[in-house]
Image: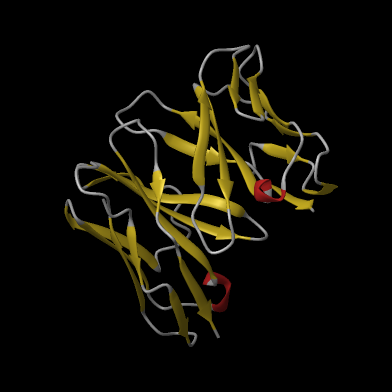
Amino acid sequence: TQLLEQSPQFLSIQEGENLTVYCNSSSVFSSLQWYRQEPGEGPVLLVTVVTGGEVKKLKRLTFQFGDARKDSSLHITAAQPGDTGLYLCAGARGGGATNKLIFGTGTLLAVQP
Amino acid sequence: DAGVIQSPRHEVTEMGQEVTLRCKPISGHNSLFWYRQTMMRGLELLIYFNNNVPIDDSGMPEDRFSAKMPNASFSTLKIQPSEPRDSAVYFCASSVGRDTQYFGPGTRLTVL
């Protein structure tokens, strides 16, 4: 059962365009993370959001955590070819010593020059 | 510093054979995770360890899968016997407690 649904699944845009990726769940998470994965490599963490309603900016990337901590969005302004990759959201659960992550279905982004 | 190291990077085997995947976490990290990634199911957590002790193996698909962490610098994921549906990219990741998980480059497994 996939608890985190991402949309869209695929996105092909031209350099300079803006885009938004959504990550939705019916479950509440203690925090939510966004990763980017390039071909032949493992995912790399971009950001962690913890508080409902939180907004974080990383250069041209803006991340928002929903008020109820069930959903999140990633907005990219003026996309560049270097932004191409698989974007994954991941919800964290559990209050133990380790973060157990549940990954979303993924959004494959291609930015054409 | 070296990141998470996985070996082999690619493995091709025949159905019924035993497969062993290896992982060396980042030095000083006390949590280790094994994930599997496929087109159909995405990235799934199989098992994770904290201080070399398995904490949650609920993601391990079947008894054919087993994982060990004999010490803080080494872990294995074994599939015996392997089946074509086990074909996937297997990732190992490590962290310090609840901090950022760092992923290795993965092992691409193909079972014929």
B3 to A8, vertically: above or below: below
Left or right? Give the position of A93 relative to A73: left
Tally of numbered discs:
0
Q: Let me know if residue B103 appears in the view.
A: yes
**Residue that appears at 59% across and 12% down:** A52
Quadrant of residue A15 within the rendered picture: top right
Relative depth, front residue between B37 and A42: A42
Q: Nearer the viewer, residue A51 or A83?
A: A83
At horizontal 62% and vertical 25% (from top left) the residue drawn is A27
To which quarter of the image does residue A39 belong?
Answer: bottom right
Q: Position of residue A61 (x, y in %)?
A: 65, 30
Of the 4 image quadrants, the one containing the C terminus of chain B is bottom right
Residue occupying the point 67% across, 59% down = B40
Spot occupied by residue A106 in the image (x, y as percentages of width and height): 67, 46
Q: Is residue B101 left or right of residue A42?
A: left
Q: Is residue A101 above or below residue A86?
A: above
The residue shown at (53%, 13%) is A51
Q: Position of residue B83 (x, y in %)?
A: 51, 77
Q: Residue furthest left?
A: B71
Q: Can residue A26 be seen at all in this image of the molecule?
A: no
By what rule are the colours in the image chosen?
secondary structure
Q: Position of residue A64 (x, y in %)?
A: 65, 21
A98, above or below A30, in the image: below
